[in-house]
Image (tube, rainbow, N blue to C red):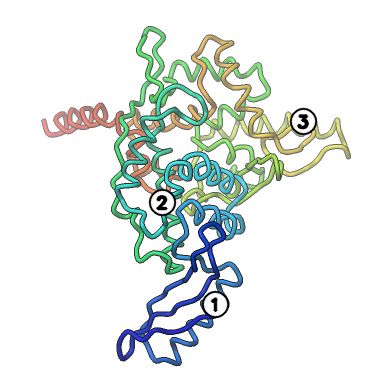
Amino acid sequence: MPGHLEKKSKSSWTIVIELGRDPETGKRKRLYRSFRGTKREAEIEMAKLISEYDKGLLLDTKITFGEYLQKWLEDYCKVRLSPNTYRRYSQILNLRVIPKLGTIPLEKLRPLHLQTFYKELIEGPRLDGKNGSLSQSSLVYHHRVIHKALDTAVKQQLIPYNIADSVELPKIQKELVTYDPDDEIDNPQAVKVLDEQQVKYMLEKARETPYYALLFLAVRTGMRRGELLALRWKDIGERQKIIKVRQTIGYTPEKGIFFKAPKTKNSRRNIDVSEDVIKVLKNHRKQQHEKKLLLGPNYNDYDLVFCQDNGLPMHPDTISSWFPEFLERIGLPRLNFHCLRHTHASLLLKAGVDVKIISERLGHSSVRITYDIYSHLMPGMQRTAVEKLEQLLK
């Protein structure tokens, strides 16, 4: 692959690399790079660029945003991300971003393109076919994926700066509500939770099911589904009354069920629990031990707290499919399993617990995320705080 230098000033050069001809237009394609230094240094840089291009590590600056994203997924994401995260990145980029922005040349992508894209995103239909528009957290996730892709483009010197830094995301209004059977307002954007009485009733009915301990722990800790299903007995400190979150479980059709490290540094955490939680877990372990004795050598011991009867890891979708039907069967609203995590947070807020503590228990990467999700409960909490302060000062 030939290349040459074009002198711009005493110590400034333009590196030109010939890339052949475009098969569609027949026009010559060239890669240009600016460089400051001596001629010898520029020649070394040119040789390096040619080598990187031959290995597929360097892209043509005329590449479209869509072509770049496809290559970024294959060369960068596939070898660095977990299977679940890679799959979600692929869905977002292939189903959302590339169809809308893919034909724009990477070097001509501007903040206005992203701003318009986000506006259309929240006004358009959801990919999962559900009613309502995209949630705020999903919008932020889309932006984060695009930002990461453009960050890599900056590092590869394909673009001078990340234009996603200049984009301000639209704010989607969301309300956190407790289910009220008399409330006829249909708000698909609401993050729904159970109140105290509904939680007590739900757990009482759950005693008749195999998942009582799992539901009890979900309400009392706010742990994610994957964290609960990956929990091991060695992660439970009975004497200290803590639960250590050290791994999570995932599933993809290609890889099956697998264990992985928590997603972020804050997700790897210790959660303080009550004596009631320890008692429920002890009873659950006793029941599990009886099953283990019955199966003998046929039991697969992964040291899991929640698993199949034979000890094998539980498919994450098992509890997700069962839980809404269970709620409906006992006369409660048909909510997803994740609502128990929100319920945990909402009950802590109602009890006057500081948001920072709640954020730490949930394993959020920042307190800001906790505020964004549960801010609609704050006004009531602030009123309670004012009344308590007035009583104290009087």
Q: Is residue 160 above or below residue 354?
A: below
Kind of residue sitting beneath label 1 = Ile
Q: Which residue is denoted by mark 1 in the rendering?
A: 50
Q: Which of marks 1 and 3 is nearer the N terminus?
A: 1
Q: Which of marks 1 and 3 is in front?
A: 1
Along the viewing direction, whichever of 15 and 88 lies nearer the viewer: 15
State the residue at coordinates (37%, 36%). Answer: 136
Asked whether residue 360 is in view, the answer is no
Q: Which residue is denoted by mark 2 in the rendering?
A: 104
Do the residues under discs 1 and 3 have CB atoms within 8 angstroms?
A: no
State the residue at coordinates (35%, 45%). Answer: 367
Along the viewing direction, whichever of 97 and 246 lies nearer the viewer: 97
Circle 1 packing at 10 Å, graded few (<14), some (14-19), many (20+), is: many
| Residue 30 image position (x, y, % from top left) | 47, 71
Kind of residue sitting beneath label 2 = Ile
Residue 174 falls in image quadrant? top left
Circle 3 packing at 10 Å, graded few (<14), some (14-19), many (20+), is: some
Asked whether residue 331 is in view, the answer is yes
Q: Is mark 2 on a helix, strand or loop?
A: loop
Q: In this view, does 82 lie above or below 387?
A: below
Along the viewing direction, whichever of 336 and 306 lies nearer the viewer: 336
Q: In this view, does 154 lie above or below 332?
A: below
Q: Which residue is denoted by mark 3 in the rendering?
A: 309
Pick out the residue farthest to the front. Answer: 26
